[in-house]
Image: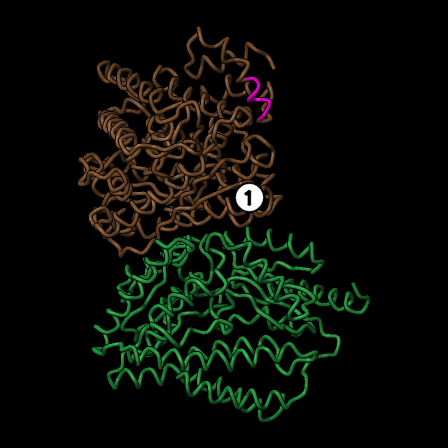
Chain colours: A green, B brown
Amino acid sequence: MTAKAAKSMEVIQGRVKTFPERVRREKRGGRKIVGMTGRFVPEELVRASGAIPYLLCRGGDPEPVEASLPYMHRFLNPFVRAQLGYYLLGMDPVVPMLDLIVAQCDDCHASRLADLMEYLRLPAFRIGIPPDWQKELSVRYYAKGLARLKGRLEELTGRRVTEAGLRASIESLNRVRTVLQEIGDLRKKENPPIGGLDFLRLNHASFYEEPDLFAAEAASLLEALEEGPGLFAPDAPRVLLAGRVVAVGDYAVPRLIEESGGVIVAEVLDEGVRHCAWKVDEGGDPMDALVETYFLRRLPPSIFQPSWGIRVRHLKESVLGNRVDGIVWYQLAFDEVYDMEYAAVARAMSEMQVPILKVESSYEYARESTGPLATRLESFVESLRAKRRVGP
Amino acid sequence: MNRDVCAEFLRFTGFEESEIPGFLPDFIEACRALNLSEADVRFSVETWIPSQFDTELEGVRRGLGCIVREAVDLTRTPRYKKQGVKLVYGILPAMSVYYYALKRTAPDRVYVAFPDLFLVAFLQMFFHRLNPTLEIAEAAGMSYGCRHCALNKARFTARRLGIIPSPDISWIWGFVCDEGPKTDEFIQECFDSDWRNYSTRLPHDQPLGTQEDEVDERVEYLALQMRDGFEQVQRVVGISVPEEKIAEAFEIRQRFVEKMGELRDLLTVDPPPLGGVEAFILGMPRDMPFNTGLEPMAEALEQTLKDVRGRVAAGRGVLPRQAPVLMYEIIPYCQPWLVKMFMENGVGVMPGGPTQKQLQPPRFEDPYMVAAEAWLKGSVTVNAGYKADQICERLLRYKFDGLLLGFLDFDRWLGSDNRLIARMVEERTGLPVFYVEGDFWEDRDYSPESLRTRVESICEILKMRKAG
């Protein structure tokens, strides 16, 4: 990475680190702070109300997962358990400052998190996401939920969410999506100037910065990367990372893939990343546009039904479009829907002769657990490299 | 297959002597289809059933027989399909009235059932032989370590082995878990593209403590969802169900619930005249449709009420007098040994029975609204705060000595609130709540021996508390 690109990355990551302090200052100045879980709470709406959004999306540490046990049973996925655990352990400085937490209720894991937030007297506001998404009934249900959220935000901040304000917010976040997409697309190059680990961290960083500031700094980064050299070995296997979520801080698997000599050239993740390929329509009614993009147009998450046929097709296109050599299916322990989906994906990939490796995590990244994980990933990357050399 | 052993099995499960010769060939055929050997049937008759169920009571035997009839009927589905009977499947938990209404409209033209449920209940309750069924699904991608639900695995296997054919429609309900509906998609994507399914979902988005049946917007949404699903079913099978049939089916269900309430009241007699497993089994058709109808179980229930009243009059019970009794919302009838183990240690485990609200007449006239309202009065599907309220109501009404939770670790909804419910109930009632990690349907991870110490210590605590 060129010095200029490295500097840009440093600036962006530095801003993430100062996010809690900035939030504290803003809160002292009277600004409201609104937490969000999942992928269906439009950040545009929160920003248009004048509040600062905060995505609850940390993971990768075993202690918060364990800390949730007095409230949650151990068969919920570690990501959801961690969101509660960071709060219980006092490891999340932002959650205690939140004036509202908009909790999406799309599956059992996320809905139980909302239950516990309420039980612990956190200011939760639920938004129901019907997984039978292709019914008109369900679309209306989600739209109603967003309208209720808009009202609640207005009540909280004392500021009306105007059409113009919401449209400006949509435009601003679309700029973030555009620049992120352009950076992500650099990985289509034979030797990418940025890998998946850095791209994921960058994508995460976009949630913890004012969109215009982020878009400006990311544009500088893009420029620097475009000018810079490729960072990987010429025969580095091209890997697609798929699964529910790579949480903020949960970088062990992408890091190990790239340390093993692979390069992550694409992701198909349901949560925790900004889905840059789908911009919100800037014309028409902005509330309708949010419903359209957030609920209907994006790749449906695994919990939606039907979704696997669509998702498999999307994966196949991503494999071809990014010249992917292999897929790492990153699954969270006890995430039952993803566990089943893997079978459908593995079958499709087998037909395409694309190797796939399933890795399951409970955020146990102690040295004892990382060793076997590293060995599996190294072997997988090595086998992909061998296949590249030999040819199909 | 030895016909005498099979006949003995049928006698044990409440079949009349006169009907055994006619039913026997189908029973033997069903055993063959389900890979049950003569040794399995012999084990069931000689060891398992006598040790697990209170077969002294005619009503209980007949109740068990209803499940046997239903399981045997399930194995006839390939034949039904060839005969042009429309097959409508579903999954637990669901509002059974729609299936019964369909059946009442066209009894000979449609087959309705939750195939996984009867497969699991039959194999595990009577033979303790579910594991091979589960292993087939695990090999196909429903991995052991993820703790998938045995029902979903059984549904996959039932289709995979050809025990059941593709349905005309599987109307799948996602009012509780996500895995149930997604299993149908799994079957369709990975094995049987003819597995046509339609899902009806309800997000878990009500704040803790909301009395969901009293939120009209909620009831309306659910009613619309139910109407949408049922209309889809009717379109696909080509049978139009008049709304009066839904109302009729609901009234029958409601009378059945009232009868269950009578039985529940009788269980409070000291000493309790019947165990929790038997009481729970008799209530099965409330939330799961029987293709053979709800009526046979209603008759078994009526008979049990007579039998139990006889025991009460004779001062006989299944536990010592003054024995502590725990409430267990959903008794794990496929693991009857659990409740027996408590009983062996002098403690009863009983279902909570219907709440006061569930016995009240509906607020609405539209049959879909009536069904939706009834559904939202049910404690297994609503938000944890309301569920805790309903549990507390019955704990206090029936003077239980505590609450038992657990055995639902595979269910990301029903099981995942147990720790939270425990806190809420303890805070509100001061009664002890015990959580036992386990599995409702299968016992590979949680065998009787692995749980014995835990059960014994819970019983000791309860007896000490009861003694003051």
B72 or B234: nearer the eye? Answer: B234
Q: Quadrant of the N terminus of chain B?
A: top right
Q: Is residue B268 visible?
A: no
Disc 1 is placed on an element classified as helix
Q: Position of residue B107 (x, y in %)?
A: 40, 23
Q: Quadrant of the C terminus of chain B?
A: top left
Q: Which residues are magenta?
A: B28-33
Corner quadrant of residue B292: top left
Outermost residue toward the top?
Answer: B18
Q: Position of residue A160 (x, y in %)?
A: 23, 77
Determine the main secondary structure of the stretch shown in magenta. helix
Which residue is rendered at x = 30% and y = 49% of the image? B421
Which residue is rendered at x = 59% and y = 20% of the image? B39
A92 to A79, vertically: above or below: below
Instruction: Identify the residue position indicated by label 1 in the image.
Output: B187
Q: Residues within 10 Å of mark 1 (few under 14, many from 20)?
A: many
Q: Position of residue A292 (x, y in %)?
A: 40, 66
Which residue is rendered at x = 67% and y = 87% of the image? A229
